[in-house]
Amino acid sequence: MVTEIRVEKVETSKINTVNFEHLPFGKIFTDHMFECDFVNGEWQQPVIKPYGPLQLDPSARVFHYGQAVFEGMKAYKDDNDNILLFRPHENYLRINISSKRLAIPEFPEDYFFEGLKTLLHLEKDWIKKGRGNSLYIRPFAIASEGAISASPAENYKFMIICSPAQSYYEEEVRVLFSEKYSRSADGGVGFAKAAGNYGAQFYPTSLAQKQGFQQIIWTDASTHEYLEEAGTMNIFFRIGDTLITAPSNDRILDGVTRKCVIQLAEDNNMEVEIRRVRVAEIKEAAKNGTLQEIFGSGTAAVINPIAGFGHGGETFELPKLENSYASFFKEKLMDIQYNTGVDDIHGWCYKV
Ligand SMILES: *Cc1c(COP(=O)(O)O)cnc(C)c1O
């Protein structure tokens, strides 16, 4: 058990050099970082220290075999200066699910929460009030042992870094339904936030971007007939008034935002179907005018409406709705995230 995390503070904060009105996503980091090493079969005493480069052996397995996992979460500030997290236990559980699949030792719960709380209190000035502002939190674990035999490492590092963020993906997003490339396969690591899942998407995504689409919706690897998810978001379709999303499984990441959307839909007596979604069905609904919306769900953008999609050389535009489900869910979720006086009946908001 840790009771207190050792903290080495920076001499001067760099916060005054940061323009919080124009934050490029994920490029600016706060003053401190959390670091914990796994050696001799144990997680050692964690420290929080000035943010800065790591020294790693070039033979560290993370560079050669991609033995690395991460999480993405956000801290918010309410009008009373409380620091808030959103369902952080889910992220804690999920990084250990990811770690297990990548043969990385699981990280202790008290280290995770003590580390996170200490770090967030230290960086509280980096969390700006106001809807849309947040501190993006990136916990990750890497195989740090210098040894290039293709086997799990003996030594690991678990770290948490933080980056101030404004609302994300404001521009219109058009997506390409994948016909050739795949993100994940049965029995693979699609359900894990494993580093390699993301690196492998960059090339196909760059091809899609050349065709005018910002992102890809991945389809099942064996037939490419079923829609699964986007690169960092789960995907919802609204046909008529029914909300449809694919079931999470070993190819699809079990998103926290996705689970919340399903819960909110049920709380509000909306029709929800959790089932496989055929590409042909969505194209048909787009053609006959019953496809109302497509939107992504994920921590970074919360809810990301999709303006149109392409498949098989055809492109489709989605209607611009006044009262979209996407904006309904986004507002509901942000009310809880920013603690703006709503009933948080499921206890999702977590005061740090
Ligand atoms: C992180 C992620 C999501 C969204 O998960 P949230 O918990 O809602 O942030 C969806 N799909 C993939 C592939 C992801 O990496």
Image (cartoon, grey):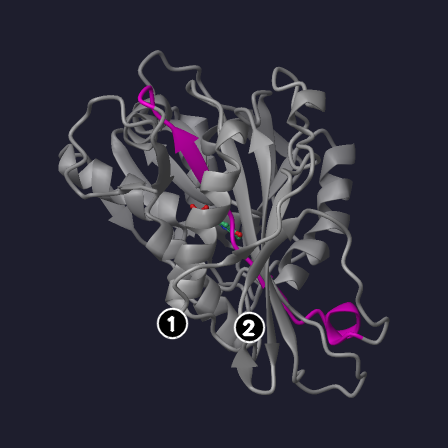
Magenta extent: 60-80
Q: Amino acid at mark 1?
A: Met
Query: Residue 181 in the image: x percent, y percent?
Result: 68, 56
Q: Establish if 115 lies above or below 292.
A: below
Residue 336 lies in quadrant: top left
Name the residue that disc number 2 marks.
188
Question: For this rendering, which residue is in front, 252 or 113?
Answer: 113
Element on which disc 2 rests:
loop
| Quadrant housing the C terminus | top left
Q: Establish if 248 lies above or below 103.
A: above
| Mark 2 or mark 1: whose residue is earlier in sequence | 1
* Residue drawn where x is 71% and y is 35% of the image: 27
Locate residue 286 relative to residue 194 in the image: left or right. left
Find residue 13 and name its label: none
Q: Are marks 2 and 1 in contact (CB under 8 Å)?
A: no
**Label 1: few (<14), some or many (≥20) within 10 Å?**
few
Query: Residue 138 in the image: x percent, y percent?
Result: 56, 49
Query: Residue 195 in the image: x percent, y percent?
Result: 64, 60
Name the residue that disc number 1 marks.
1
Locate residue 232 relative to residue 109 in the image: left or right. right
**Does residue 2 show up magenta in the picture?**
no
Q: Is residue 186 visible?
A: no
Query: Residue 95 in the image: x percent, y percent?
Result: 47, 63
The single residue placed furthest to the top in the displayed view is 322
**Label 2: few (<14), some or many (≥20) within 10 Å?**
few
Q: Amino acid at mark 2?
A: Gly
Could you give the CA–CA distance between mark 2 and mark 1, rounded to whole angstroms?
34 Å
* Residue drawn where x is 57% and y is 51% of the image: 218
Q: Establish if 245 lies above or below 334.
A: below
Q: Nearer the viewer, mark 2 or mark 1?
A: 1
| Quadrant housing the N terminus | bottom left
